[in-house]
């Protein structure tokens, strides 16, 4: 969800607990589904490919993805994993972040602090509720072509899912979930905070410091700055991909944790390796912002007609 417009304007009013409506959840799920089905998944695939093949340039990563199936190569992992993730994560974030932000404000936190608390809590909930196994299976699907390169016929995604569950149980399906949680926590916490700072700067420049409505371009600019700058935590994303990758490497730690995976990547690829895929990650953040903000009003109107109730969620 767009961070700049997801937070309420600065106010001293007593915090009000808002009900979570079906229309709000449908809006979040619908916008996320559109985002991932258009440019979202191709950027995710390129980002994951670069994080997995840390010696590739951006151009080489594009060629590698194209070689896996042309245009369809850029949509690996879309069905069902990316769709499951997209249709649930917006709803989870909206519900949990809203509750956490309310209780933080009721406890005395200001809007800036409560927004960060809401983002952090919602991000962690996203990770453990649905994103852990979804990102794991997307990564497996994107990287399992390495088996084919080694002369081994890769199994189907669902067979792979069943094999992992049979051998390692829930823990195996959720491999890397702690890294996902750290990424989401730092991602949404910094995105909410940085977007708020960007919004305040835009309000000063445009003389809208008294709660006046921002234009669509101003909303997109504030959220894109917040989303783009939040890519500082890309090393966590690279660690997540490495932990979830099924590649065979005798030098990799047998039991991978966030700490020893960081050491493995740093030892082999240095600081540069920890930031592989940051460019498509920034592009992904900007595209998410455009979808959530620019298309938000149109989506609101459609959802209101579909459900018959007024959408109150910020987008």
Image: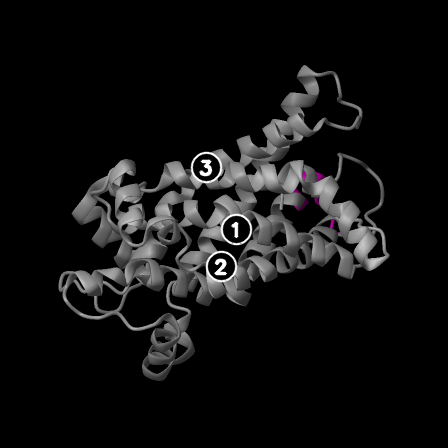
The quadrant in which residue 88 appears is bottom right
Q: Which of the labelled discs sits on residue 36, or is there none?
A: 1
* Relative to 102, 89 lies left or right: left
Q: Of the residues under marks 1 and 2, which one precedes in the sequence?
A: 1
Q: Which residue is mark 2?
A: 82
How far, Cα to Cα, is label 1 from label 2?
7 Å
How far, Cα to Cα, is label 1 from label 3?
13 Å
Instruction: For marks 1 and 3, give the one nearer the viewer.
Output: 1
Query: Where does the image place residue 300, in percent across and percent down from the top left?
Result: 76, 46
Query: Where does the image place residue 64, in percent across and percent down from the top left?
Result: 26, 47
The residue lying at 38 percent from left, 36 percent from top is 279
The residue lying at 50 percent from left, 40 percent from top is 285
Q: Secondary structure at mark 1?
A: helix
Q: Secondary structure at mark 2?
A: helix
Q: Which residue is mark 3?
A: 283
The quadrant in which residue 222 appears is top right
Q: Which residues are magenta?
A: 107-114
Q: Secondary structure at mark 3?
A: helix
* Relative to 66, 43 lies left or right: right
Q: Of the residues under marks 1 and 3, which one precedes in the sequence?
A: 1
Q: Of the residues under marks 3 and 2, which one precedes in the sequence?
A: 2
The residue lying at 29 percent from left, 59 percent from top is 143
Q: Answer yes or no: do the residues labelled 1 and 2 have beta carbons within 8 Å?
A: yes
**Image: 17 above or below 218:** below
Q: Residues within 10 Å of mark 2 (few under 14, many from 20)?
A: many
């Amino acid at each position: 969800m767009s961070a700049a417009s997801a937070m309420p304007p600065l106010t001293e009013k007593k915090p009000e607990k808002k009900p979570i409506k079906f229309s709000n959840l449908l809006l979040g799920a619908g916008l996320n589904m559109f985002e991932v089905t258009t440019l979202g998944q191709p950027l995710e695939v390129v980002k994951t490919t670069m994080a997995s093949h840390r010696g590739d340039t951006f151009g080489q990563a594009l060629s590698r993805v194209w070689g896996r199936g042309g245009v369809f190569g850029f949509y690996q992992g879309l069905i069902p994993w990316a769709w499951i993730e997209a249709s649930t994560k917006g709803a989870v974030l909206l519900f949990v972040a809203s509750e956490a932000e309310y209780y933080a404000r009721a406890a005395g936190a200001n809007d800036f602090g409560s927004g960060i608390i809401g983002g952090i809590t919602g991000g962690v909930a996203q990770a453990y509720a649905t994103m852990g196994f979804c990102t794991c299976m997307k990564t497996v699907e994107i990287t399992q072509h390495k088996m084919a390169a080694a002369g081994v016929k890769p199994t189907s995604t669902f067979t792979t899912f069943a094999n992992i569950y049979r051998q390692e149980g829930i823990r195996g399906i959720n491999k890397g979930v702690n890294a996902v949680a750290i990424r989401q926590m730092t991602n949404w916490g910094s995105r909410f905070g940085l977007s708020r700072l960007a919004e305040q700067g835009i309000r000063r420049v445009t003389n809208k410091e008294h709660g006046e409505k921002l234009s669509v371009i101003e909303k997109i600019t504030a959220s894109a700055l917040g989303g783009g700058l939040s890519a500082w935590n890309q090393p966590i994303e690279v660690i997540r991909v490495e932990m979830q990758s099924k590649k065979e490497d005798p030098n990799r730690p047998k039991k991978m944790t966030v700490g020893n995976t960081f050491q493995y990547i740093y030892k082999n690829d240095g600081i540069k390796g920890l930031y592989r895929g940051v460019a498509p990650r920034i592009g992904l953040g900007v595209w998410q912002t455009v979808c959530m903000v620019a298309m938000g009003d149109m989506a609101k109107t459609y959802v209101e007609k579909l459900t018959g109730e007024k959408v109150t969620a910020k987008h």
